[in-house]
Each structure stands twice: as C-alpha cells, then as structure tokens.
C-alpha cells in the first residue's frame, strides 16, 4: 500500500470510530440506552428467580459484554490513531538550534493532537472499566444459573429418593 492509501484508510477509520464512540459515551452519560451497556445482577432478596429468568439474565449479560468489548476495541483503535497523529506532528516539528528549542517547537505544534490523544486514552480507560464490569456480570449470571440448575437436580433427587443412607456418612 502506498502512503496515500494508508492515510485515506486512517481517515476512514477515524470517521467510522468517532461517531460510534460518541454514541456510546452519550449512552453512558445520559443513561438513555444504558441497558445496552450495563446490566445489574439481582439483589439477594430477589434471588429466587425462575430458570427462564436466569437464562434471560445470562443472555442479556452476554450481549452487554459483547457490546462493551466491541466498544473497548474501538476505543483502543481510536487511541492508536490519535497517538500516531500526535507522534507524526511532534516528530515533524522538532526543529531548532538546541534541544530545548526543538522540544518547545514540537510541543507547540502538536498541542491539539496531544489533547486528542489524552482524551482518547481517557475513553480507553473508561471502556476497559466497563468491559471488566460487564465480564464480571456475565460470569456471575452464568454462575447463578449453574447453581440454580444444581439445586434443581439435588431437589429432584431428594424428591425421588435417589439418596442412600451411605451418602450421608463420613469417611
């Protein structure tokens, strides 16, 4: 690929990612579609959920985890683009007679790109925290479902008399 193609790809990727990230940040801030990015595990007083409700919770938390993981990936990509732009402007403007002058010229020329890079890095941190929370919620929902299934199996065995007296003896 030639340089023009790479720059065009970079611009297209940036144009694609910016609105996606803005949409998700709006949902995060305003709460308008926060259920797409956040799911809460039920409190202990509502733990007696049916198997269908638990299966629904597992599906919802898995979907949220998938969306948030996609968002985190997009923010990491956007950060890399911002970092590349900053480095390009910074390095191309390191001119001057001595090190202090070169540094001052480079920092002044790349100030806008630096601000964009730091902002993108902040969004990456936010996305990664959302990703961790969504992963925990998804894993917890699956554990709730597994434990409930185990309890149902144990109740069934108890009702049908599948236990023997030897099952309760110590070794």
Image (cartoon, rainbow, N blue to C red):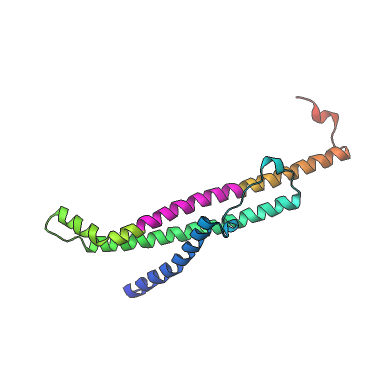
Q: Is residue 4 above or below residue 105?
A: below
In the image, residue 159 sits, relative to residue 141, either above or below, namely above
Q: Which residues are magenta?
A: 117-137
> On the rendered structure, is 47 left or right of 90?
right
Q: Nearer the viewer, residue 45 or 90?
A: 45
> Could you tell me which residue is drawn at 83 percent across and 40 percent down?
157
Point out the residue furthest to the right here.
160
Give residue 168's position: percent from left, percent from top. Answer: 80, 28
User: As displayed, is residue 130 above or below residue 113?
Assistant: above
Residue at position x 45%, y 59% in the image: 75
Residue 66's quadrant in the figure?
bottom right
Q: Residue at x 39, y 54 (%)?
A: 121
In terms of secondary structure, what is the magenta stretch mainly?
A: helix
Residue 121 counted in the magenta span: yes
Q: Quadrant of the C terminus?
A: top right
Query: Which residue lies at the image location 74% right of the left edge and 47% below the top edge?
Result: 49
Q: In the rendered image, which quarter is residue 158 located in?
A: top right
Q: Position of residue 109 (x, y in %)?
A: 24, 62
Magenta-span inclusion, residue 35: no
Query: Where does the image place residue 124, in percent across and percent down from the top left?
Result: 44, 54
């Amino acid at each position: 690929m030639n340089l023009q193609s790479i720059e065009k790809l970079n611009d297209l990727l940036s144009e694609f990612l910016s609105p996606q990230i803005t949409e998700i940040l709006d949902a995060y801030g305003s709460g308008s579609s926060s259920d797409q990015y956040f799911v809460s595990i039920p409190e202990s007083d509502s733990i007696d959920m049916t198997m269908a409700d638990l299966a629904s919770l597992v599906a919802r938390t898995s979907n949220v985890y998938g969306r948030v993981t996609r968002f985190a990936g997009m923010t990491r990509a956007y950060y890399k683009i911002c970092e590349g732009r900053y480095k390009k402007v910074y390095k191309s403007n390191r001119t001057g007679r001595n090190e202090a002058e070169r540094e001052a010229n480079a920092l002044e020329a790349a100030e806008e790109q630096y601000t964009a890079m730091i902002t993108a890095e902040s969004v990456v941190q936010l996305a990664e925290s959302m990703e961790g929370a969504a992963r925990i919620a998804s894993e917890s929902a699956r554990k709730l479902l597994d434990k409930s299934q185990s309890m149902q199996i144990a109740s069934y065995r108890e009702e049908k008399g599948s236990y023997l007296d030897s099952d309760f003896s110590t070794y």
